[in-house]
Image (cartoon, coloured by chain):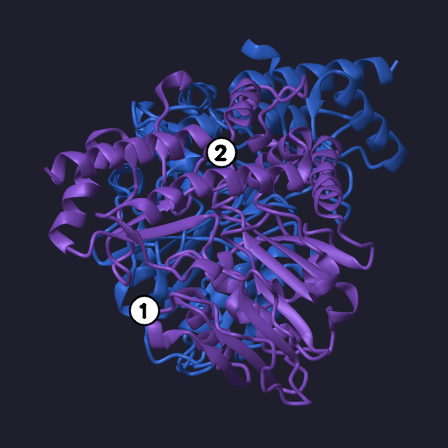
Chain colours: A blue, B purple
Amino acid sequence: MKYNRTFNFSAGPAMMPEPVLEEIRDEVLNYRGSGMSVMEMSHRSKVYQQIIDEAEADLRDLMGIPDNYKVLFIQGGATMQFAAVPWNLMKNGKAVYVETGAWSKKAIEEARKYGEVIVAASSKDKNYSYIPDCSNLDIPDDADYVYICENETIHGTTWSKLPDTKGKILVSDQSSMFLSKPCNVSDYGLIYAGVQKNVGPAGMVVVIIREDLIREDLDPKMPIYMRYDTHSKNGSMYNTPNTWAIYCCGKVFKYLKSIGGLEAMHKRNIEKAQVIYDFLDSSKMFKGTVEKESRSLMNIPFVTGDADLDAEVVAATKAAGYDNLKGHKSVGGLRASVYNAMPKEGAEALVDFLKKFEAEHSK
Amino acid sequence: MKYNRTFNFSAGPAMMPEPVLEEIRDEVLNYRGSGMSVMEMSHRSKVYQQIIDEAEADLRDLMGIPDNYKVLFIQGGATMQFAAVPWNLMKNGKAVYVETGAWSKKAIEEARKYGEVIVAASSKDKNYSYIPDCSNLDIPDDADYVYICENETIHGTTWSKLPDTKGKILVSDQSSMFLSKPCNVSDYGLIYAGVQKNVGPAGMVVVIIREDLIREDLDPKMPIYMRYDTHSKNGSMYNTPNTWAIYCCGKVFKYLKSIGGLEAMHKRNIEKAQVIYDFLDSSKMFKGTVEKESRSLMNIPFVTGDADLDAEVVAATKAAGYDNLKGHKSVGGLRASVYNAMPKEGAEALVDFLKKFEAEHSK
């Protein structure tokens, strides 16, 4: 790659498109004749208002977000949304969660502070290596919503089919698959995503919420920053937002549009992941840890079955310039995160390396 | 200035030192041979750990932060701290606040959600144009802390002498004067500051808190993200922090050290503000709105006494390339924010312009 850049398989923050980084570099000291860096701009200025407006418009365009959904840019990560979602959405104090791994578990723990949480399905029995059948969940009539983590970063699973919520609102944490494929926003009441995996720099969550779910009759103890109505009424600028992240994400939205939108991105992601899955399915040394129908296109955990050998492979990949391939401790082995900005060449280079490693170690 | 940059008098986000921006630009595509942008780095990587560790060490060095204080990097702005401070620190459910303007008012409103707030002094009677005498405040024995906003961005006031807290913990919002002068951290129990005014890009607050004030026996309803112990136990990386802001702020900390630290910065800030205050005190057209002993070195509001003329001046400054000088609507007139990174030449150029304007309009 240009600039001596490495193939970075980090689970997040992660790679960004190189043309976007080049544009950012060129504008660091003076954004388009404004005389200042975007980092130095008043968020109340006309020039910045245009940046945030364009970012929102491009995202709406990219995802086809209906007019009755608000787009909010909020700080605090998915971690803060784990609390904000139940606190803002629970009217009856009850919600259904599907437990598919580490991140849905954290969301469940946090939601229990604000109401009753019913875990209607779980894949804990097989270390979260699959997405449970959710075609007929037991959902109480007074449940406020059904919650899923649509791609589990650590376990490498994704939902190929959304759960039947039986008319209840669907809430989805899309952090590690946001904008990786087309999304029918109308299927959801609320989508949120930390941008630091598949879009831009860390420190921002995008919340897409159906307008009628934004309430004002909330617990008076809720911090003003955690209320969706605060951000909604003020165009995400009740206080100073993460102006830099909005700017960078806006550029990534434009980049995605320029390459053909989410359909084109999805096609690339399928091809890219296929390179790795095809290898794993043919390898005698390595195997994927996830059931085939639940495999993520973004996070691909795999093991040799021997912890020492796993560690040896990780060390060898790092020495060869493929970064951040160590698997999360709860799964072990390796994990290749191949988000939108990872080129297919990165997947191919990694597979070539692993093939060579396997050949050399099977003699 | 180089790069056709303007003198930007924004109240925040605001100017950053040009040498820092140049370094950032040069590292956007590949940080020091790491093969990636800081925006793309796993926050769990060695290379990033070094960035955050150095940022904290340099800040500790710069401010002389004692070992029994923790430094936390948290998202959500001062707005989130308005809730986090009372929720984390109120053990007896009671605190004393001093009302000196818009930002302390917001902090008071938010704190009332979590306990009893006693406003022990206020400068509301004169539109917050001075800091009230706080040498003998009425502080209940069971008050958990005394809270001040140490520089009111909108009203342009600052504390030349800290309040006598009668042995209670002092909490200070230093957002708009952070690192503008030496600070004796031991005088405080907790200092916090949004970095987007005097340090780096928006989206991060620095919290400096005495260790013994970090509690675990907190309201079970408190979101995990709002608990100081969450951030403290995890080196500000319970979840992905605003990695970019930490990186940029770290560079500014190093820059401040390189120019002689906070003593040197304070001297520059005094000289710079003096240029403007001297003009205001000698002008027949313009006058400062703040009582002399409470004048901020950072935010300088001034008026002509005629709203139409004020508007004319604002328009003329903008046309001449001095940006963001319009005063906040609650004070009117103009406001020159001259944070650390505003060069003295900026203040001089503005004064030259205002002198010329006055001469031309007094004929």
Vertical arrangement, residue B243 with respect to residue A279, above or below? below
- Are the residues flagged by discs 1 and 2 in contact, CB closer than 8 Å? no
Which residue is at the front of the view, A60 or B243? B243
Tell me the mark number nearer the camera, choosing from 1 and 2: 2
Residue A180 showing in the rendered view: no
Kind of residue sitting beneath label 1: Leu
Tell if the residue under mark 1 belongs to the same chain as the one under mark 2: no
* Quarter of the picture holding the N terminus of chain B: top left
- Cα separation, mark 1 vs mark 2, equals 40 Å
Q: State the image quarter where residue A141 is shown.
A: bottom left
Q: Residue at x 71, y 64 (%)?
A: B187
Residue assigned mark 1 = A213
Q: Chain of mark 2?
A: B
Q: Is residue B69 above or below residue A221?
A: above
Classify residue A4 by image quadrant.
Answer: top right
Choose between B262 and B27: the one closer to the eye: B262
**Residue A168 figure quarter:** bottom left
Give the x, y percent position of residue A68: 22, 58
User: Which disc is residue B16 wearing?
Assistant: 2
Does residue B260 appear to the left or right of B252 in the view shown? right
- Whether residue B353 is visible, yes or no, is yes
Badge 1 element? helix
A143 to A34, vertically: above or below: below
Which residue lies at the image location 15% right of the left edge and 55% below the top edge? B307
List the single residue furthest toward the bottom.
B141
How many residues crowd mark 2 within 10 Å: few (<14), some (14–19), many (20+)?
A: many
> In the rendered image, which quarter contains the C terminus of chain B?
top left
x%, y% of residue B337?
Answer: 40, 45
Q: Is residue B341 above or below residue A126?
A: above
Name the residue located 49 percent from the left edge and 52 percent from the top edge.
B176
Direction from residue B97 to residue A124 in the image, left or right: right
